[in-house]
């Protein structure tokens, strides 16, 4: 399900089935390597959307968590934790952060739930159909991560 | 003088009404197809009943369901977009069956024979929904109706799919 009026209606009738949220983590920067930064965001966006499509009955795709590359990691983590906590308290027992920004890997241990890092491939280095196939392949690789997560207890939050 | 003033006010009112009228009409026109699409995926595809080629021929089919991905063009007023679709397709005797992979519970994508504990069934990883080979939902799992089924046509040996039909 997605952040739209139509989907929130579906959610309200089925909330006991929807226990997982995806938060795309998208970096911003202008004036320096913006092309690369945009590629990361675009790739993360496509990937998150495909995952949502695959698991639409159980997963809610939230709006992207955006940050300036210059924002220090501690602050970022704090902000993301606040998002996480809010949605966790509201019934999303599994939260998955999807990103192509490798910076997050250094902070992985400080995050309350699962980080899914996938290196970005640029859509313009592929034919459109090839790009789609690539994303589908990635989604297929990632699917077991979701199903394994659902087999295990949700991670508890600090407070 | 007062007469003239009243005249102007009423003309402005007239314009306001007219604009609201047109705007409201446009909004209603735009909204209803979107709402319909969101609420009922089967209806969305049913809107165009044209058959499209999915790039596979009859002699490539077996009795084992295989997944075929294809694109459909959706027209919504002036806006055309390509949408990805899939089907699980197989042969049952002489008949060709093409099922929609969209779980009838809450819309996740089902896979054939993907769960070790439930071989030879369609399995939905979201809430363990299950369906028989012919798409019938299995009692005791969340889905309450069978997988939707496509109209199928064979032209010169190539498979064409038409609209998606709900079954109960
Ligand atoms: S969406 Fe398939 S079982 Fe719930």
Image (cartoon, coloured by chain):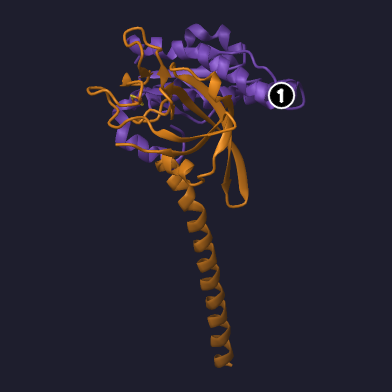
Chain colours: A purple, B orange
Q: Quadrant of residue B102?
A: top left
Along the horizontal axis of the image, is A82 left or right of B58? left
Above or below A51: residue A151: above
Q: Is residue A28 visible?
A: no
Residue depicted at x 53% and y 18%: A98
Above or below B63: residue B162: below
Q: Residue A64 location in percent, x, y?
A: 54, 28
Q: Is residue A4 visible?
A: yes
Residue depicted at x 45% and y 22%: B90
- Nearest the viewer among A39 and B37 is B37
Cβ of mark 1 under 8 A from ligand 1: no
Q: Chain of mark 1?
A: A
Along the horizontal axis of the image, is A103 left or right of A151? right
Q: Quadrant of residue A72?
A: top right
Residue depicted at x 68% and y 26%: A128
Q: Residue A55 location in percent, x, y?
A: 43, 24
Q: Residue A56 location in percent, x, y?
A: 43, 28
- Nearest the viewer among A123 and A31 is A123
Above or below B122: residue B86: below
- The kind of secondary structure element at disc 1 is loop
For mark 1, what is the residue? A127
- Tell me which image quadrant ligand 1 sits in: top left
**Which residue occupies the extreme left position in the image?**
B140
- Nearest the viewer among B87 and A107 is B87
Q: Residue B11 location in percent, x, y?
A: 57, 81
- Nearest the viewer among B168 and A143 is B168
Location of the C terminus of chain A by quadrant is top left
Residue depicted at x 70% and y 20%: A122
Location of the N terminus of chain A by quadrant is top left
């Amino acid at each position: 399900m997605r952040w739209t009026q139509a989907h929130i209606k579906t959610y309200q009738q089925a909330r006991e089935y929807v226990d997982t949220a995806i938060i795309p983590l998208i970096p911003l920067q202008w004036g320096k390597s913006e092309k690369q930064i945009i590629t990361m965001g675009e790739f993360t966006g496509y990937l998150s959307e495909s995952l949502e499509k695959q698991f639409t009955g159980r997963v809610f795709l939230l709006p992207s968590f955006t940050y300036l590359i210059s924002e220090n990691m501690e602050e970022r983590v704090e902000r993301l934790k606040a998002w996480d906590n809010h949605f966790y308290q509201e019934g999303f027992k599994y939260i998955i952060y999807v990103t192509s920004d490798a910076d997050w890997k250094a902070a992985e241990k400080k995050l309350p739930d699962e980080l899914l890092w996938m290196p970005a491939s640029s859509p313009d280095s592929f034919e459109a159909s090839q790009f789609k196939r690539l994303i589908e392949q990635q989604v297929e690789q990632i699917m077991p991560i979701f199903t394994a997560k659902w087999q295990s207890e949700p991670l508890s939050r600090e407070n | 003088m007062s007469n003239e003033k009243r005249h102007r006010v009423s003309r402005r009112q007239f314009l306001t009404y007219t604009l609201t009228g047109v705007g409201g009409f446009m909004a209603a026109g735009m909204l209803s197809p979107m709402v319909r699409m969101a609420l009922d995926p089967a209806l969305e595809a049913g809107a165009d009943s044209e058959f499209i080629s999915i790039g596979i021929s009859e002699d490539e089919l077996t009795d084992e369901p295989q997944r075929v991905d294809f694109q459909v063009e959706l027209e919504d007023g002036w806006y055309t977009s390509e949408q990805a679709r899939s089907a699980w397709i197989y042969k049952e005797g002489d008949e060709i069956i093409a099922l929609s992979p969209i779980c009838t519970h809450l819309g996740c994508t089902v896979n054939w024979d993907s769960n070790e504990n439930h071989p030879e069934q369609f399995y939905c990883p979201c809430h363990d929904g299950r369906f028989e080979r012919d798409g019938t939902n299995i009692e005791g799992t969340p889905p309450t109706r069978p997988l939707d089924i496509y109209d199928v046509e064979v032209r010169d040996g190539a498979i064409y799919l038409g609209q998606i039909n709900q079954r109960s």
